[in-house]
Structure formats: C-alpha cells, structure tokens
Image: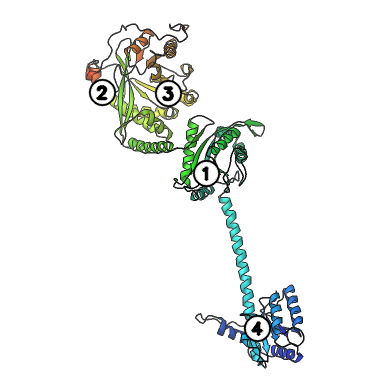
Amino acid sequence: MTDFETERRVLIIDDQSQIHETFARIFQCDHRSEHELDDFEARFLLDDSEPQERQPSSAPVFALTHAYSGEEGVYEVQKSVDAGERFSVAFVDMRMPRGMDGLATIRRLWRIDSDLQVVICTAYSDHTWDDIVRSLGYSDKLLLLRKPFEHDEARQLALALSEKYRLSIRQEEKLELLKSEVNRRRKAESELRDMAHRDALTALPNRPFLIEKLEQVLANQGPRRRSHDALLFLDLDNFKIINDSLGHEAGDDLLNQVAVRLQECVRDHDTASRCSDSVETSNDAAGDETIRLGGDEFVVLLERLAHRDDALLVARRIVQRICEPFSLGDRLVTVGTSVGVAFIDDSLADGHEALRNADTAMYQAKNSGKGQIAVFDQTMHDAVVARHELEAQLRVALREEKFELRYQPIVNLKTCQIQGVEVLSRWRGDDGEYVPPSEFVPVAEEIGLINHFGEWVLERSMREFSAMMASFDDAQRPQVYLGVNISRRQLADPFFIDRLQAIIDRTRFKWSLKLEMSENGDTRHNERSLQTMLDLHQSGVGIHIDDFGKGNSSLTCFHDYPIETVKIDRTFTASITIDHGHAIITQAIVQLAHHLMANIVCQGVESAQQLNLLQQWGCDLAQGYIFAPPLDIVQLERLLITPGESDGIKILKSTVPAPVTMPASPAGGPTGGIQLPTR
C-alpha cells in the first residue's frame, strides 16, 4: 500500500492537455510553508480543547497520473486497485466531449473504489450542486471546484482530501487490527471456556458445564411442556480397589473406557437413541450429554424424552454396559455401578438442586445393593435433610455433653445375681424425644466423631461407676463388672491403649472392665485391632463380642479373638420360643462357646419362657427387661443395695425353671440339643 506520509497519488481526468499542465505546475511548485498541512490539520481536524504540540513534518509529495478521458480514468483506477496503490484524490472534468462525461465517469469510478475522493471541475453554470447531488447522491467524498480556480484552492483541496483519505485508511487499518484482536481474544476465550468446561482426562464436559446446561434446561421448563428431562448420576463400584492395586494409570484408562461406554449408551444430538430402539424423543431438538464430575462420578443428562420410562431404559443399559469386563493391559477387571435418576421440572430452584437430587437417588440405589437404579422422590430429600440436621445436633450434643448414660444389669443365670452392667448411651434430641443409638452411632462413625464419643462414654461411665463402687463398704461391695461398647475405629487407633490408660488414671478406675465390640469383617482381618485386643486381654480387660449373629458375624471370631464372652443378638433371643431355626442356632452357639471356653450372654430376654429355655441350654448370663430396664447410676446403686426390691425391679430368684418345650421343627426333625465333641 502507498505510504501516504511521503507520497499521495492524485488522478487528473480531463480531455484538455493544458489543464493537465496546469495541475502539474500546481503540485510541483514550491510550497509557501512546509507546515501548510499541519496548519490545516490543526485548524480543521484537531480538537481545539486539547493543546497540540507542533511537530516538524516534511511537505507532502503528490504523484500525478493523467487520464484524458473517462474511460482512461476508469482504467487507471482499476489498475491502482489491483496493484494495491489506490488514488487518494481524483480531479474529474465535468465536460468531456469524447466518451463519458464527468458524472458517468464518477459513477464508474466509485463502483471500483468507493473510498475515492473526487473533485468535480466545471466551468459551466448549467450543472449546479443540486444537479450533481440528484445524479450522484449525497457523499462526503465529493467536492465541487469551479473553473477557473486558484492554484491554492486546488492545492488545499488536494491536501485536505488526501489527508482525509489517509486518515480514513489508517482508521480502517486500525479497525481491521481491532477486529483481528477481538477475534483472537474471542477465540482464546472460547478455547479457555472449552478448557474450563472440559474434563482433562476424558475430554467430557465437566461440572461447571453441567450447571450451566442445567440452568438452560430449567429455563425451558413450563406447565405446557410435554417432554421430559432427566439427570442420571452414577459412580463406579470397586474403583478405589482397582486404582490402588493396579495404579493410577490403570485407573485413568478405566475411566476413559467408562466414558466411551456411557457415550455409547445415550443419543447424539438430534439422533435416535443408540441405547434402545424404543426410546423416543419429542419433536424439539434434544442433545444428551455425558459429564464427568470428578473421580469416578459421572452424570448423563437426557433432554426432551417422550416418556419418563425412557430414562430408566437408558439407566438399565448403563448398568448392563458398565458391568461388562474392562481390559486394562493384560488384565480383565469388572466394576459395577448404581444409578440415581432425577427428573427435571420447574419446581427446582436451580441446577445444583437437580444434581443434588440425582446424587441422593444414587446413594439410595447403592444402599439397596449393587447394580440398582433408584428414582428420586421427596422422601429421599426429607431423609437427607433429617440426616444433616441429626449431624448438626450430634456435634452440638457432643460438644455440650448432652448425652446420658444408662446401665442395664447382666444376670448370672446360675446364681441369679447381677454379675455386670452394660453401659448404654441415651441422647434426647432438640424435640425432647430420645434418639436411639442405632440412629446416631452410625452417623458418629461416618462423620468421624465416634472416637471422641467413645472416649467420652468410657470416661463418664468409668467415673460414675468408680464413684458408685467407692460408696459401698468393702464387705457389702458387689462384684460387678462394667461393660462398655467400643467401635472398631477406636480399636484400630494405635494409641487406644494409651488413651484408655489415661482415662483409668483420671477416673481412678480399679474395677473389672469389659470392652464390647461388634464382630465384623473389618476387625477380623485388621492386624492392629487384633494386637490391641491381645494387649487388652493380657492386661486383664475382658473382650466381649456384641450382637453375635447379626450382620457379618462369623464363627472364626472364636478362633481369631481372645474372647471371654459372646453376646447373642436379641433378634435370636426374641424368637427362640416361636422359631425352631432360631432356637437350634441359639442352642448351638451356647454349646459351641462352652466348648471353646467362652461365656454366653443372651440379650433381650423379656419372657419367662425365653429365660427357662436359656437356662435349660446352660446359658451363662442374660440381660433384658425381665430383669431390669436400663437404669441411671442412682437407680443402679439402689438396685445393688437391695436387689429385687428397689423401684419395683424384679430379679428372678428361682433357680429351678419350669420346663419349657422347644418349638417343633417344621420338617419334624429332632428338637434335642446338638452334641459337640469335647475339646
């Protein structure tokens, strides 16, 4: 492009050679001032409100091109455009007898170069400015110069128009640069946005993308909408085991393969489902998305389904595909998944609530067993809210020590004397009702408060028990042990014995202590827990297995643990008089424990019939409401002072039970005791 700072191209179109010579003299003569253009610019183009510093400049150089007809002028302009060296100003004569006149020429010139500045030169009075405007239209690129004209007039017009042209070209160049920069930044922003909305591992959309997408879906909800939108939430079963055992590379490979399978299970945008031929879409465009939230969590967004059941079809397909083996190197591994389904409607506050509902449904599905599908409903949400409220109240209760302790007697069935007490925790909620331990203890385990809670129960019960025992005279003091439940997490704590010793020292506890724990797979195979139990046993602390027969109980506990006593779960005791199978199992456990030199405590004894059967089978100990309910420490002290007479509590005195017959076997089999070999 021409450098307008040093040279300005001017086209002269006139059929008379003397006019061309005149223009040549005008633009080649000495300038009266080399600052003439600067003066003009300062006077007419610059803002008077801002002082301008005068800069030295070189006088502009004009390069003239001569055309002697309109056609020749059109040719020169076309050539200049093709070469990229356009004219800044064209002086066009109005009357040219040969060929086109000035007006026709200008129309042709502007078709080629619409930015060309034109000065019409005319000596005739029959062409007024209004005539020219009617022919060419209003334009800021058109000026009229009457012949004969002064040289200064022509020169000033050339200076002004060429400068205007130069500035307009500069402006266009800057505008193009600005457009280019805007496009570059938009592209960079789009790339950054895409990066921010894409999972780095699988290249699937991520959580921020999902939330934005859900907001769009929610905006389209309405009472007249006939199609359905659904959110499917899933995570992988056993992913952590694979990741830990085979390494993170194998885990990443698995996640990528899962992403591919999920995409195969949903429709592409505006296409029929590849999951099932029966899945239909509404007439509106639908774009299903597979999203990785992080870790092994994925979400599938299904839009504009014709039927709600279609979401369940996709969910079942996902469960089936994910359960198929994956190839990781030279290994085949199997994982599974459970899917939570939440439908999206205008009742939702935002995308976060939709995602939360699907997450809640997924956990409901997992709690129902592996490979399950659950659809969100309001009761799930209510349960989650209640759970969060319970957590918050539990933290406050533990901090403010709002728990109460009760002690339930454990009776020796041979002597009919109280041999021990089990500590039971009680918690009165904000509504004044007691929250059962079966509800708040699992919550304490899940939120990491069980160790703190367990230590509080140990210290409070040992302090109360020590104070009670110290109140008796040596001759009247009962020989009663204190049984305290501990969790498997406490047992796995490497500093548990040190903590227990510190509690013993603080409470000055010098009585018999038994620690009760539930038998389960975690403790059975935990070497640290086993060593802790051995150390406790050697130090004189008895180990009791609580709730035997419930959950994951196993007979191997008799071999693995240094067990002193096994406590049979109340579900067996409650049905021994009506369920032959439970009766046989309970009797067998009693005999097995005796052969292995362990005592038996049957929990939940409530009737004389149950008690008589247990005595016939040789059960050592029992506890339940037939003897006494859980008591506070004051009631317990009174009971120990006058057993059987305090507060209406009745302790069984008879050691000769009335005969009770076991329930008949459904198959008519034997009802006698199982004979085990002596050890």
Q: Residues within 10 Å of mark 3 (few under 14, many from 20)?
A: many
Q: Position of residue 131 (x, y in %)?
A: 63, 85
Local packing at callout 2 (Cα closer than 10 Å; few below 14, some 14-19, many 20+) is some
237 on left or right of 124 = left
Q: CA distance from mark 3 to mark 4?
A: 99 Å
Percent coordinates x, y for residue 252 in the rendering? 60, 39
Q: Residues within 10 Å of mark 4 (few under 14, many from 20)?
A: few
Camera-near label (3 vs 1) is 1
| Residue 438, label in figure | none
The answer, for residue 8, to whether it is visible in the render is: no
Q: Is residue 28 above or below residue 507?
A: below
Q: Could you tell which of marks 3 and 1 lies nearer the N-terminus? A: 1
The residue identified by callout 4 is 58
Label 1, on which residue? 229
Which is closer to the viewer, label 1 or label 4?
A: 1
Q: Quadrant of residue 40?
A: bottom right
Q: What residue appears at the point 52 percent right and 43 percent down from the top-left corner?
A: 228
* Distance in Å between CA atoms under marks 2 and 4: 111 Å
Q: Position of residue 8 (x, y in %)?
A: 69, 81
> Label 2's element?
helix
Between 527 and 86, the one nearer to me in the picture: 86
Give whichever of 22, 33 is nearer the camera.
Answer: 22
> Residue 658: percent from the left, percent from the top?
32, 6
Q: Comparing marks 2 and 4, which lies closer to the viewer?
A: 4
Label 1 packing within 10 angstroms: few (<14), some (14-19), many (20+): many
Q: Earlier in the sequence, mark 1 or mark 4?
A: 4
What residue is disc 3 on? 518
Residue under label 2, please give it: 468
Question: Residue placed at 31% from the left, 6% from the top?
Answer: 656
**Is 16 left, or right, of 580 in this rendering?**
right
Q: State if disc 4 and disc 3 touch (CB < 8 Å).
A: no
Residue located at (26% from left, 15% from top): 650
